[in-house]
Amino acid sequence: MHAAIAKQLMTKFSQLDMAFMIGNEAPDVDKISQMSKDETHYLVPSNRGTRRIDLRAFLQEHPETLSDSFTLGYYTHLLADEVWLTDVFMKVVPPQDNPRRPAVLERYYEDFKKLNPYLVHKYGLQPLPSTATEAVPADFADKACVDKLIQDYNADFTGETIGDLEVLSITQIDVYIANVVNMMTKVIDSGIFVEK
């Protein structure tokens, strides 16, 4: 879904380039590096009993966000994840104390695998070229992690749709993508960041 959001924004704004696309995938480097998700996603405790993404902390650490394509992509990913948590995840996955949660989470993650072919087709997504690593700032992560991040992204293009979605819906996904694209369009047009 992050790639679909990035692709839509890159279509609207010609100044967004491969660095934006890679930045948009970059927070997920936690899965393949020594960095924790708390670090890469700026996670802090929330009053909703879970964690939330501290967009303000990211912006304070990266004041160049609007002028740097990679960093703007990174911000887009964080905003998209925060919107996902509030608008989708918390509505379809039961709270932690609910005994149904583990079974629902299992089906929820299976839905992600089923969605990849739909997203590739609907949003015209393409695998990233091996040269995409050149768009990553040298101080972000080591080259092996960046290469692995791109390989993992490209692996999403090999799946096949297997059955119907069980927890998520196509409409829900399309609405979510459109909402994040609209929010980021306002950010880019106005230069005013979304406060959460």
Image: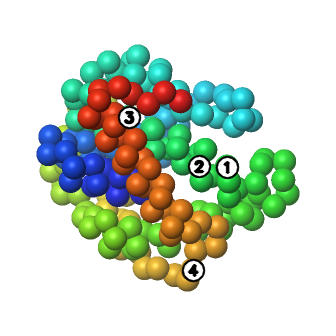
Sort mark 3 into few (<14), some (14-19) or many (20+) by Cα contacts within 10 Å. Answer: many
Measure the alpha-carbon separation of dots 2 and 1: 7 Å
Residue appearing at x 75%, y 65% in the figure: 103
Residue at numbered disc 1: 90
Q: Is any atom of residue 99 visible in this view?
A: yes
In this view, 117 is above or below 23: below
Lower sequence index among marks 2 and 4: 2
Q: Is any atom of residue 111 visible in this view?
A: no
Q: Which mark is residue 87?
A: 2
Looking at the rendered structure, the secondary structure element under dot 2 is: helix
Residue at numbered disc 4: 164
Give, as a three-letter code, the residue at label 3: Tyr
Give, as a three-letter code, the residue at label 4: Asp
Residue found farthest to the bottom: 163
Measure the alpha-carbon separation of dots 3 and 1: 21 Å
Which one is in front, 34 or 50? 50
Looking at the rendered structure, the secondary structure element under dot 3 is: helix
Residue appearing at x 28%, y 35% in the figure: 188
Sort mark 2 into few (<14), some (14-19) or many (20+) by Cα contacts within 10 Å. Answer: few
Which one is in front, 133 or 43? 43
In the rendered image, residue 104, in percent from the top left (x then y), is placed at 72, 63
Labels 2 & 1 near each other (Cβ < 8 A): yes
Give, as a three-letter code, the residue at label 2: Asp
